[in-house]
Image (cartoon, grey):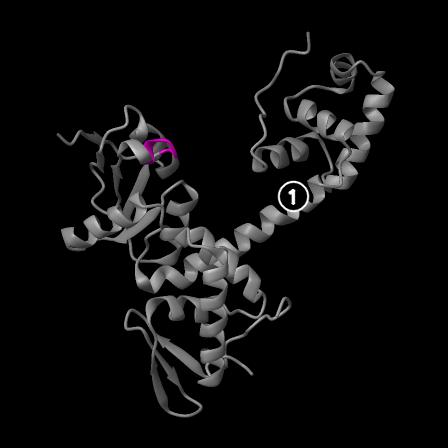
């Protein structure tokens, strides 16, 4: 039996998150005929977090937004069911599926995204192990005093490390540091300094 | 080939959804398969061949060596046809 789930309208990112709850096989978005999310899952795929096929307007911007929101495939509206099944099959075997005419836009987007990530990675690689610890602690909202206590160093030393980390990563302030940490996939949930 | 940044020839226009490129310089129509068309579109003079190979690998999940060979062959063919600047 195929389990289905119908969702209301809302921002795409939140919708995909809500869609995968309970791991249904298929999810349709109600109320907005232009945007429908279909989630198909089997045991093998579930490990990597599911299959998301977004059906939306046939333009590159909508497709890139869907991919950024976690979609692995994109289909233009009003396509035959056979097209949808083909797309689900491609995604199910680890591939990405978008309309042929949007493939170039997706490729360019992935090139740019990889370049941004590699740029961040090359800056992260310049941090010493201690500075990496300081970066991780700062990402979780700790100030120089709390970082000092956590790492058994003086707050003055923590301040020096923080300054170096900011300079090496090219961020001006704490908010920039946290934003960068989030982009790197680091834990940024605030941690009690006790 | 590391710093090869192919760039589309000016005067070549895409016929969306039809897999066709029209070269206004020569008046010739070129039919491309979807992969070749996507690679041609990604040739913006900024992306290197290596970056395009990495992106195709990420999207297709294919082996980088095999994809590298295919992308380089495609770029060479597009150049031969005058669709990318020599």
User: Relative to A106, is A122 on the left or the right?
Assistant: right
Q: Secondary structure at mark 1?
A: helix
x 46%, y 61%: residue: B67
Of B27 and A94, the residue lying toward us = A94
The segment highlighted magenta reads A45-49
Q: Quadrant of residue A134?
A: top right
Principal SS element in the magenta part?
A: loop
Of A90 and B20, the residue lying toward us = A90
In the rendered structure, does residue B77 fall within the stretch colored magenta? no
Q: Position of residue B26 (x, y in %)?
A: 42, 92
Q: To which chain does the residue with label 1 belong?
A: A
Q: Is residue A169 visible?
A: yes
x 45%, y 55%: residue: B63
Q: Is residue A109 visible?
A: no
Q: Position of residue A110 (x, y in %)?
A: 48, 54
Question: On the image, numbered disc 1 is attached to which residue?
Answer: A121
User: Relative to A185, is B14 on the left or the right?
Assistant: left
In the rendered structure, does residue A47 fall within the stretch colored magenta? yes
Give the quadrant of the N terminus of chain A.
top left
Say above or below: A89 vs A11: below
x 33%, y 32%: residue: A46
Q: Position of residue A62 (x, y in %)?
A: 36, 51
Of A56 and B62, the residue lying toward us = B62
């Amino acid at each position: 039996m195929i389990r289905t789930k119908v969702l209301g309208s809302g921002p795409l990112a939140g919708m995909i998150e809500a869609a995968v709850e309970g791991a249904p096989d298929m999810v349709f978005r109600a109320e907005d005929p232009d945007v429908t999310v279909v989630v198909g899952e089997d045991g093998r795929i579930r490990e990597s977090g599911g299959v998301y096929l977004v059906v939306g307007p046939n333009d590159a911007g909508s497709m890139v937004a869907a991919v950024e929101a976690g979609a692995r495939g994109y289909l233009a509206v009003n396509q035959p069911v056979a097209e949808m099944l083909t797309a689900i099959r491609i995604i199910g075997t680890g591939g990405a599926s978008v309309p042929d005419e949007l493939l170039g836009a997706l490729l360019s987007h992935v090139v740019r995204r990889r370049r941004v990530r590699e740029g961040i990675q090359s800056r992260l690689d310049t941090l010493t192990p201690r500075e990496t610890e300081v970066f991780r602690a700062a990402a979780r909202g700790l100030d120089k005093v709390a970082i000092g206590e956590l790492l058994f160093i003086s707050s003055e030393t923590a301040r020096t490390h923080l300054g170096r980390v900011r300079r090496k990563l090219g961020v001006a302030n704490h908010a920039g540091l946290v934003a960068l940490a989030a982009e790197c996939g680091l834990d940024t949930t605030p941690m009690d300094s006790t | 080939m590391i710093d090869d940044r192919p760039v589309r020839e000016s005067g070549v226009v895409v016929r969306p959804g039809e897999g066709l490129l029209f070269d206004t310089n020569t008046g010739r129509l070129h039919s491309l398969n979807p992969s070749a068309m996507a690679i041609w579109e990604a040739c913006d003079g900024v992306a290197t061949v290596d970056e395009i190979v990495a992106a195709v690998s990420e999207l297709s999940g294919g082996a980088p060596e095999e994809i590298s060979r295919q992308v380089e062959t495609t770029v060479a063919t597009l150049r031969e046809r005058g669709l990318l600047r020599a």
